[in-house]
Image (cartoon, rainbow, N blue to C red):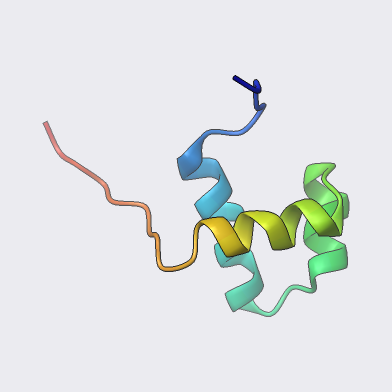
Amino acid sequence: MKVTQFTEAQIVAILKQQDSGQTVAQISREHGISEATFYGWKAKHIGMQVLAFRN
């Protein structure tokens, strides 16, 4: 299996940055990913959100 440097929660948080008005180019540079990676994540994680659970 392929090893990733980002967790699912981090990926969803990165994707949500686009909703706040940042461009894909800005987000990609900030996190060191390609725009193709961003759009691939977006296609895979569409509709997902980070849920915070309290113990």
Q: Nearer the viewer, residue 55 or 34?
A: 34
* Quadrant into which the N terminus falls: top right
Q: Residue at x 48, y 40 (%)?
A: 8
Residue 26 x %, y %: 85, 63
Q: Please state which of residues 50 and 37 is positioned toward the viewer in this rendering.
A: 37
Q: Residue furthest front?
A: 1
Q: Is residue 21 left or right of residue 1?
A: right
Residue that appears at 74% across and 73% down: 22
In the rendering, at what x and y percent does residue 12 appear?
Answer: 51, 53
Q: Residue furthest left?
A: 55
Spot occupied by residue 47 in the image (x, y as percentages of width and height): 41, 68
- On screen, residue 42 above or below 8: below
Q: Quadrant of residue 55?
A: top left
Q: Is residue 1 above or below residue 27?
A: above
Left or right of residue 38, residue 42 in this image: left
The image quarter containing residue 36 is: bottom right
Above/below status of 39 relative to 2: below
In this rendering, would 11 be left or right of 9? right
